[in-house]
Image: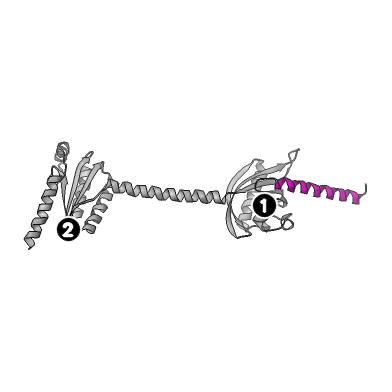
């Protein structure tokens, strides 16, 4: 066989191999390609041409640098070098600029080396699946879940520091459980906000349900009393149990001129009566 015939036969074999390779890539589920060791595209499927917005003839024998923005192309070439060096399968989820519509799409990509029977590395192959909608749905779900968690946290905060309007100018704050620094800060802000919104002059702090009162808890409650006084409201305590009273005495906690009542009813009768007396005295 002459040299010309040999060359022609090799060219036919090469065309047949490329056609077979392209047919195989077309059968792949997603965007598929094969590159040589220099990163030149040996074969791609139609899905790849759509992503790159180029025809087959504009892609074959070109590199990523000819198709994508430089930073993106360099990242692809780095991945190719890694899989060819390791011979292992690499899976990555990454954004890419779709060239036809100019939008960002997310791809779930699997790459590995093309290895000959004798172990020689011939290039790399990759298959990618468009997961843009999946990621958008995941991001949207995360956003909704975040908003739900925030709403739940606000509801918990409101339930943890309830401020009730019992009478014109009279607020009640029933406290249950433990009072830590965070809750004490919320309590202070809630009470001051309610005093301003309602024009309140009396605030009844019902501590019947507070699990324990120590020096720190007492100090936080008295800080709330002092802050309320600065904005024109007086506070009184309801429900100081015998054990709590004993603890306060042992701790030498001074309540000052803060009035205390056994029940909410007693406190309400007192503050409402005081409010009425104050109005009648002004007439």
For label 1, the SS is helix
Q: Position of residue 166 (x, y in %)?
A: 19, 51
Distance, label 1 to label 2, CA atoms, is 72 Å
Quadrant (top left/top right/bottom left/bottom right) for the C terminus: bottom left
- Residue 34, image x and y in percent? 71, 48
Query: What's the mark number on residue 47?
Result: 1
Residue 4 seen in the current view: yes
> Does 252 appear above or below 198?
above
For mark 2, give the secondary structure.
loop
- How busy is the neighbourhood of tag 1: few (under 14 within 10 Å), some, or many (20 plus)? some
Badge nearest the viewer, 1 or 2: 1
Q: Outermost residue toward the top? A: 243
- Whether 19 is among the magenta residues is yes
State the image coordinates of residue 79 (x, y, percent, origin top left): 63, 48
**What percent of the width, then of the height, locates residue 253?**
16, 43
Between 26 and 14, which is closer to the camera in this rendering? 26
Colour mapping used in the image: one colour
Q: What stretch is highlighted in magenta?
A: 2-26
Judge by depth and name the residue closer to the eye, 65 or 212: 212
In the image: residue 232, left or right of residue 74 = left
Left or right side of 207 for 75: right
In magenta segment, residue 20: yes
The answer to whether residue 282 is left or right of residue 120 is: left
Mark sitting earlier along the chain (1/2): 1
In the image: residue 84, left or right of residue 179: right
Magenta stretch: dominant secondary structure: helix
- Residue 232's mark? 2
Residue depicted at x 48% and y 51%: 140
**Neighbours of disc 2 within 10 Å: few (<14), some (14-19), many (20+):** few
């Amino acid at each position: 066989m002459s040299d010309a015939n040999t060359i022609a036969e090799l060219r036919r074999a090469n065309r047949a191999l490329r056609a077979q390779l392209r047919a195989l890539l077309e059968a792949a589920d997603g965007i598929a390609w094969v590159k040589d060791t220099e990163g030149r595209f040996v074969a791609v499927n139609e899905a790849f041409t759509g992503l790159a917005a180029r025809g087959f003839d504009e892609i074959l024998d070109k590199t990523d640098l000819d198709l994508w923005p430089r930073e993106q192309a360099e990242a692809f070439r780095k991945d190719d070098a890694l899989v060819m060096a390791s011979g292992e399968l690499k899976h990555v989820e990454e954004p890419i600029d779709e060239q036809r519509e100019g939008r960002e799409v997310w791809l779930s990509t699997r790459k590995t080396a093309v290895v000959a029977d004798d172990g020689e590395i011939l290039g790399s192959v990759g298959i990618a699946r468009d997961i843009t909608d999946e990621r958008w749905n995941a991001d949207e779900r995360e956003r909704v879940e975040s908003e739900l968690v925030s709403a739940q946290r606000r509801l918990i905060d409101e339930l943890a520091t309830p401020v009730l309007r019992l009478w014109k100018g009279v607020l009640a704050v029933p406290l249950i459980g433990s009072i830590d620094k965070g809750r004490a800060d919320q309590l202070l802000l809630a009470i001051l906000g309610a005093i301003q919104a309602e024009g309140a002059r009396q605030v009844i702090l019902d501590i019947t349900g507070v699990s324990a009162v120590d020096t720190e808890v007492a100090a936080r409650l008295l800080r709330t009393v002092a802050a309320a006084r600065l904005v024109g409201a007086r506070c009184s305590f309801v429900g100081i149990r015998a054990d709590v009273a004993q603890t306060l005495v042992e701790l030498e906690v001074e309540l000052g001129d803060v009035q205390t009542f056994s029940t909410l009813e007693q406190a309400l009768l007192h503050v409402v009566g005081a409010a009425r007396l104050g109005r009648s005295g002004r007439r």
